């Protein structure tokens, strides 16, 4: 309670000080100060409103005007000078006493147009002036506006990471990734694609989709291959939005019980074992290669001598982290061939299965 009271008193004190300060300025013959931010950093496509102080709601005979003459005298596109461009983006509502800034009408700062070679300034400048018809002296406030490029999204790829990764396997099918403009204004824009590194001509654009051709990646389809891609949205030649992402192509991950010698590409299967019926058993973990794409494991099904087997006693289990198959000691199981099928979902999203046959005698 005491803390709340102190905070309330502090708030009242600040409000009181501000009111006193404004009253003093007005008593000196000036209109109330705007108290607007002197600099803003906005993202392309972002739109904000700035409210003038509450005192302006009750002031009559006050005119608000914007000036953009402090911007460099340069023509930024086929029709607009820089001054005209900023005038479209920054507007004032006389009745509501609000200033609206629409960064979608501007271009990102310090960006050079590939069309005309013009470079945008670091800051766009707007000056708001209030004048009075009843003798108060005018007040001004200049706002510097910096615009940052926006981020595109990819429909098929989670974009929570700074550089998202998409994964595919060599299966003879093309991969498609749809570029989402994320509600950005698309008028007079063009989507382009840059391939970092050494492009091989197997990745391109089809409308709003980045297409990785069926024959892309390692020609022998034995090794991983990464494409570093940069789809970019351009407006009048200026880059207004982009999203870097990477596509990793790889062979189908190897998932089996046994040993894989990657240096020689040799596989040794150990997926059929003979056990003593009723005895406890724990298998080795299955092989998953490349290991960095390994996910968690689960028991999918069990058959006995080819027919479905219902494990009512919960004797069979699979360790989620390693994939080890365990059979509990028991007096329930009869001799026969028990085929235990595991499933896993790689971190790439690919679902895989493998089986271990336990011959109980």
Image (cartoon, rainbow, N blue to C red):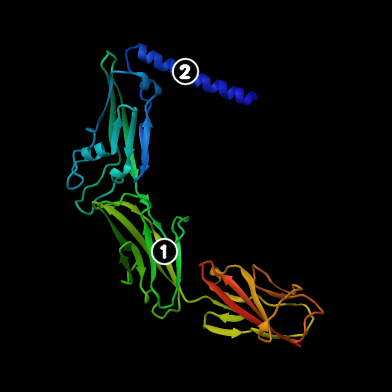
Q: Neighbour class for label 2 at 10 Å: few (<14), some, many (≥20)?
A: few
Residue 103 left/right relative to 335: left
Residue for point 25% across, 16% down = 133
Circle 2 residue: 17
From the top left corner, tell me how far across and down residue 59 is, in percent: 34, 18
Q: Are marks 2 and 1 in contact (CB under 8 Å)?
A: no
Where is residue 64 shown, x and y percent of the image? 28, 25
Which residue position is annotated with label 1? Answer: 246
Seen in the picture, residue 204 relative to 143 is either above or below; the reply is below
Would residue 196 be visible to someone looking at this image?
A: no
Extreme residue in the top direction: 27
Which of 121 and 234 lies nearest the eye of the viewer? 234
> Which quarter of the picture shows residue 46?
top left
Within the image, what quadrant is residue 18 found in? top left
- Viewer-nearest residue: 33 or 309: 309
In the rendered structure, which disc, 2 or 1, sits on the residue that comes first in sequence?
Answer: 2
Q: Which residue in the rendered view is the most extreme toward the right? A: 331
Q: Which quarter of the figure has residue 291?
A: bottom right
Image quarter hosting the C terminus: bottom right
Q: Secondary structure at mark 2?
A: helix
Residue 242 visible here:
yes
């Amino acid at each position: 309670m005491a803390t709340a009271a102190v905070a309330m008193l502090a708030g009242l004190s600040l409000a009181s000080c501000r009111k006193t300060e404004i009253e003093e300025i007005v008593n000196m013959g000036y209109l109330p100060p705007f108290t607007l931010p002197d600099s803003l950093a906005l993202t392309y496509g972002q739109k904000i409103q700035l409210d003038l102080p509450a005192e302006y709601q009750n002031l009559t005979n006050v005119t608000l005007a914007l000036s953009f003459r402090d911007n460099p005298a340069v023509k930024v596109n086929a029709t607009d000078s820089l001054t005209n461009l900023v005038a479209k983006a920054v507007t004032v509502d006389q009745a509501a006493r609000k200033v609206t800034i629409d960064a979608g009408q501007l271009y990102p700062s310090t960006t050079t147009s590939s069309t005309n070679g013009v470079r945008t300034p670091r800051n766009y400048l707007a000056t708001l002036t209030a004048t009075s018809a009843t003798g108060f002296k005018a007040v001004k406030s200049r706002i510097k506006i910096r615009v940052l490029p926006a981020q595109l999204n990819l429909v098929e790829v989670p974009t929570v990471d700074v550089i998202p990764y998409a994964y595919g396997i060599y299966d003879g099918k093309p991969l498609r990734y749809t570029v989402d403009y994320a509600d950005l204004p698309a008028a007079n824009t063009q989507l382009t694609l840059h391939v970092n590194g050494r492009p091989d001509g197997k990745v391109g654009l089809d409308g709003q989709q980045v297409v990785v051709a069926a024959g892309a990646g390692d020609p022998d389809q034995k090794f991983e291959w990464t494409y570093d891609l940069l789809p970019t949205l351009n407006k009048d030649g200026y880059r207004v939005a982009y999203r870097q992402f990477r596509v990793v192509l790889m062979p189908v991950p190897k998932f089996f019980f046994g040993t894989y010698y990657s240096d020689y590409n040799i596989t040794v299967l150990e997926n059929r074992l003979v056990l003593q019926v009723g005895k406890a058993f724990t298998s080795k973990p299955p092989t998953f290669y490349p290991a960095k794409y390994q996910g968690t494991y689960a028991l999918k099904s069990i058959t006995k001598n080819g027919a479905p087997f219902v494990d009512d006693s919960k004797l069979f289990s699979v360790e989620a982290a390693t994939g080890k198959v365990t059979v509990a000691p028991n007096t329930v199981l009869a001799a026969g061939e028990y085929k235990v099928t595991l499933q896993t979902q790689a971190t790439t999203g690919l679902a895989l299965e493998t089986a271990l046959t336990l011959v109980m005698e």
